[in-house]
Amino acid sequence: MNIPLVDLRQQYQSLHSEMNAAIAKVLERGDFILGREVEQFEIAFAAFIGTRHAVGVGSGTDALFLSLHALGIGPGDRVLLPANTFIATALAVSDAGAEPVLCDVDPTSFTMDAESARRALTPNVKALIPVHLYGQSANMEELMDFARRKGLLAIEDAAQAHGAENRLGRVGTLGAAAAFSFYPGKNLGAYGDGGAICTNDDRLAEQLRLLRNWGSTVKYVHRVQGYNSRLDTLQAAVLLVKLHHLAEWNRQRRTIADWYRNELRELGDELIVPSEAPWSRQHVYHLFVVALKRANRDVVLQHLQSVGIGAGIHYPVPIHLQEAYPHLGGVGCFPIAERLARQILSLPIFPELTQEQVRFVCHELAIGIRLAG
Ligand SMILES: *Cc1c(COP(=O)(O)O)cnc(C)c1O
């Protein structure tokens, strides 16, 4: 049995004729830049998330960067973010000319820890970026309360959490802006790069529409010094087809997570298994990340790979230990993120994964743990 970490081909096969027709329509019309489907998708995606606006941009990284830039965050400013995230969260801050400030993560949900954020606060911090990691909302009640009391802007990194919910509402509706990624492997993925910013702020949305298009909404009239970062019409057409299936795919991911939890119950002493955090209402399981309490993770990973299971690590090196960021704190600064980087293991998850495949993965995981023990 060969089980990849994610399988995009099965999904394409199930959408084949609808998808090909949608792509052909764009090819025949030829409006490749800011064409018809871009606006259609923006309206549909904003409705799905529950914000007044969605602005389609070139990637999730650009969605974060353009949000920070449009909110006036730049040189001299500092921005709080968790040490356990994909590097793009930090890069967007650096790209904007601001300085990332890291904090540690919560030991059970692995998302940004509010207490650690409070400790990391310094006078020049203007914003924080809660990351809704692996498909689960960060603790937005505590983080938004902290942001309000300290006068900080919150920009949500929702790149892994399309459709996730917490007790306050849907992820992407809670901060000043929220960045989504449509990287192919995300819960809603394009056939290339893409991203969007969701916001309820009319002026911010207008500013983002300028910034993504060389500072222009009227041809050759440039109101600000902008960028070239638009969601392609072809990608918007792909995303429109897929958006209709997103709720159903997310439900299936939650079912698969239940299968995993059932199968992994006997390994309870060996593993931290993903669960719904107290503040969460809908984890959408972009990834299914377990943490190995005792067994050597790399031995277990190697065993899974040797039997054809595409397990992975998200992420093996915390931001402050990356060579790209030598000044954000050394070894020991964020002990939970550092421990997780050694212990975590992402098991395959995608909507088409079968119960039999889940059983096989769990069976081999148990063997791997015995070998590593
Ligand atoms: C994927 C991802 C991004 C970046 O999105 P791209 O579309 O790949 O630029 C940012 N943050 C997180 C947490 C991500 O998972």
Image (cartoon, grey):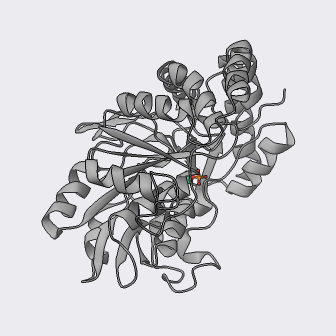
**Residue at x-position 59% and y-position 57%:** 343
* Total marks in image: 0
Most foreground residue, 193 or 70: 70
Please determine whether, in this image, residue 361 is positioned above or below residue 331. Answer: above
Does any portion of residue 270 appear in the rendered image? no
**Residue at x-position 34% and y-position 60%:** 113
The quadrant of the rendering that contains the N terminus is: top right
Most foreground residue, 56 or 156: 56
**Residue at x-position 46% and y-position 73%:** 96
In x, y percent, where is residue 32?
66, 38
Most foreground residue, 111 or 185: 185
**Residue at x-position 29% and y-position 77%:** 125
The answer to whether residue 92 is left or right of residue 8 is left
Q: Quadrant of residue 239?
A: top right
The answer to whether residue 313 is left or right of residue 240 is right
In x, y percent, where is residue 233?
61, 36
Please determine whether, in this image, residue 253 is positioned above or below residue 167. Answer: above
In x, y percent, where is residue 237?
61, 28
Does any portion of residue 92 appear in the rendered image? yes
Please determine whether, in this image, residue 300 is positioned above or below residue 11. Answer: below
Q: Quadrant of residue 68?
A: bottom left
